[in-house]
Image (spheres, rainbow, N blue to C red):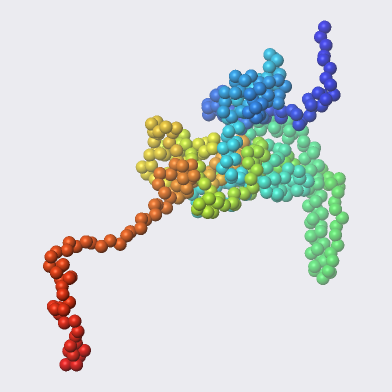
Amino acid sequence: MAFSRGVSPGGALLRTSRMFSLPPVIPPPPGNKLQMISERASATEAYPTHQVLTTFESSRSRGDWGLKRPLPLKSTTGTTYPMVKVKEMDSLEQITDFTSGTQHGLTLKKFQALNIPISTPSEISDPSRLFRPVQRSVFEADTDVTAFSPDEQIQEAEKRWKFSGPWLAGMTPGEFKEYLAKTVRPKRAEFRKFIQKKIAAQKTEAANRELQETAALRGDAVAETQEPFKPESITDDEVTEYLRRLRNDNQVLYDLVGQFLDLAPLKPPQAAEARQHSLLVNLRATDSPYGGRGPPITHPSAGISYLRTAAYLNNHPIYGPQKSHPPVQARVLKPRRGGLGNDAKIGVAGFVADGPLGTSHSNLRGNSVMDKFDPSIEGGAKLWVNVDKATVDSTGRVQLTVSDAKATDVLIAKELIGDAREPIFGSAPKRQEKTFKKIPMTAARLRGRYENSDSPSSPTMSGSSGYGLR
């Protein structure tokens, strides 16, 4: 006979408390069929899906990780960094299913060592341009807000990052048809009521504008105000006629549908793409940073950094304040090849980034570090770079923008880690002693030096001719 064991009130409280429970698992990133590496089981995921746990060294030696049961020492004490991810607290075998969490745990530590903030993405893809947009933090007070009133939700659409509706440009044809059938079509009646409110507001605004113009012609100081029209006063024929007029105004129609369904901003297509999408030709450009790639699936910072700015100075103990931040070493993962789309790929703090662009040192012709792969280099080829910007794209992946580091900054960084082979400003010049050439003393010179002063070879006193008297 099966029976259920009773749980104490304290145990039930701990089980239901969010403070003493692991957060739910985040869905994994969608796989791309064109990139088979994302389908491999050994590949590192784009972002962590499980909570990473750590413990003290004294507790790890006992297998105590703060869980329901201790973890085996053989698989947890052999690693340098104590980090695990719990997949399942109680499996079918009544054990705790866990795996190593150093993949994302060390990546987080490496990224936080860079001390750079997360910025909103920009549409400028060429960092070598002279004009660079000002980096805007994702934690600004006017953008890092999710609770909006209905009016603010419409006014702040260009600054928001969270929407209840989808991003239409990122949907497949099948997903779009399913969205129309299950979400849009059942809301026809609600949309007509929404249009009634818009018509009532427009009629009220037009009436007030007419009253103000009439008062201005009469010379009245104060104009009368029209009582707001009620949405119930708008007939179905007016709604139908208004919808017919909207068919010829793509921008107004898209704005109203986007406000009603709370759709993410959509960037208009380019001139070449506009021919295939004739309905999107007249759409105006959006100022939203997520119009081109879509809003992020998480918070724009992804929880990887909470810094708001990089406006600080590094103070060197010997050389004083530095103009730029310390550079970091990057590993060349893929050398540069000739042709479009074959740029070099480098690894920075656990992330893959594009190589420095423009006329930089690493792009000079004949630079063997970026041009070819040399397997004889221990640990792989490396170069020093500066991390200029970090963003999180719509799929939750961290994108880094790097540039070549200055030679002086590289020497200072090498000196701090004891790898500088030569002084930064060169060795101090040695003090040059004033030397005199020694001339050998001959017998004649000795006789002339010690010659008797009573019989000089030349007169010791000048005559009157020496003073110009003769």
Picture coordinates of residue 259 (x, y %)? 73, 44
> What number of labels is visible?
0
The residue located at (46%, 42%) in the rendering is: 418
If the image is split into quadrants, where does the N terminus sit? top right
Picture coordinates of residue 328 (x, y %)? 50, 42
Examine the image and state in which quarter residue 204 appears: bottom right
Examine the image and state in which quarter residue 39 appears: top right
- Residue, far bottom: 469
Picture coordinates of residue 322 (x, y %)? 52, 52
Examine the image and state in which quarter residue 116 appears: top right
Q: Which of 84/185 is in front?
A: 84
The residue located at (59%, 42%) in the rendering is: 391
Q: Which of 151/143 is in front?
A: 143
User: Does residue 47 show up?
Assistant: yes
The residue located at (71%, 40%) in the rendering is: 163
Picture coordinates of residue 455 (x, y %)? 14, 78
Q: Is residue 108 left or right of residue 88?
A: left
User: Does residue 271 show up?
Assistant: no
The residue located at (21%, 89%) in the rendering is: 467
Q: Which of 444/276 is in front?
A: 444
- Residue, far top: 1
Q: Is residue 162 left or right of residue 337?
A: right
If the image is split into quadrants, where does the C terminus sit? bottom left
Answer above or below: position of 53 versus 390. Answer: above
